[in-house]
Image (cartoon, coloured by chain):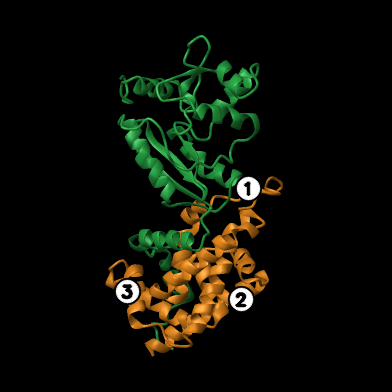
Amino acid sequence: MPSGGRRSRAPVPPFATVLEQHGRVLLRFCISQAGPDRGEDVFQETMISALRAYDTLKDPDAVRSWLFSIAARKAIDSHRAVGRAPVPVDDVDVIRSAVSGGDPANAAGGEIWRDVARLPDKQRQAVGLRFIADLSHREIAIVMGTSEAAARRNVFEAVRRLREDLTDAVR
Amino acid sequence: MTPTDPDTEAIEHRLAAGRELDVEPSWRRLTDALVQRAAAEDLLDVAVERHESPFGALMLAATREGVVRLGFPDEADGFLDELARLVSGRVMRAPRPSLAAARHQLDQYFDRGRTRFDVPLDWRLTRGFRREVLTVTSAIPYGRTLSYAEVAACAGSPRAWRAAGTALATNPLPILVPCHRVLRGSGQIGPYRGGTEVKRRLLSLEAGGTADQGA
């Protein structure tokens, strides 16, 4: 437990509050990147890493971007671990049923995440950060360590590809 | 191209629908597992639990060393922030053996089944003369009282009764360290962190009454 130099820094929020404020959207992001089961593991790994490194958080206002950058890294690790295997159908069904809210008319909305899973790492992350976490392009850039223009491009390219995938599927 | 081509807006709409993903069904299980793992990996600097009492929900916090803070209901809002500021940011709502012991003994105390507390305490939130005053206070037996001046004298500074008052008013461990047993010299009840009414009820409990309101 640190005791020296504590007063010279802006106080960090209690971790319990961080978990309460950002935990659920972080979990949704992890699920969007790795599917429901592995997503929960990614979430767990992210939170343990964050807790372990909590002393090193320099700017308490940046806690959200800091958490998402850890999660993005952990999701990539998880993605690599399973190789290029497609997301199991069960996983997709869980997302689909959650997203559609049981309305068959919207059921296709969930299927899109199977295509998201096949996107290149950066595009998959950008899509999750933009549409699940609802981050601005500016914050996506901070999380991914890119320029804002690159963040915008990653989101754009991802959406373009998904549109092509769906077009192919229809055809 | 077929006429059913989904346009960009529709794609974005589908993606954004993922925000509605309901994680509540698994939230409790996940956070419980997280807390367990944090404890197992020794990452839990401060564990916090709420505890129902005759005075409303108390807040209890413990470090690895022992119970570090007890808060009355009106202190609940800033409780976690205070601990993050003064002890460590690694604060989580979690059980801990010292908290379980304190909660059990508090229940017994409120039921008049216990006259002294036997739980490890972490004194880090008080120091110097204030700590001396609280150490003296912790030795006042159940049902007995001292004056501010007497406590100051026992702490080695007979004329520092005002400073003794401050020490008692900022006691981080009320009830467990029984600052309610210190009264004004005049016999008036004096101020209390949890409010004068709580102090009066604690004294009434120890005098053979109950902690209930209007006892």
Q: Which mark identifies residue A153?
A: 2
- Residue B105 in picture, x, y percent from top left: 36, 38
Which residue is the site of mark 1? A11
Report the front residue among B175 and A90.
Answer: B175
Sequence-earlier tag: 1 or 3? 1
- Residue A13 in picture, x, y percent from top left: 57, 50
Q: Is residue A6 above or below residue A152?
A: above
Sequence-earlier tag: 3 or 2? 3
The chain whose colour is green is B
Report the front residue among A23 and B186.
Answer: B186
Q: Is residue A86 above or below residue B114?
A: below
Residue B49 appearing in the image:
yes
Residue A24 appearing in the image:
no
Q: Is residue B193 above or below residue A125?
A: above
Badge 2 amino acid? Arg
Alpha carbon of mark 1 to alpha carbon of mark 3: how far?
45 Å
| Element type at mark 1 | loop
Alpha carbon of mark 3 to alpha carbon of mark 2: how far?
28 Å
Mark 2 closeness class: few <14, some 14–19, many ≥20 residues within 10 Å: some
Badge 1 amino acid? Pro
- Residue B189 in picture, x, y percent from top left: 47, 16
In the image, which is nearer the foreground, mark 1 or mark 3? 1
Check the rendered structure and report the hue given to chain A. orange
Which residue is the site of mark 3? A107
In the image, which is nearer the foreground, mark 1 or mark 2? 1
Residue at 47%, 88% in the rendered image: A84
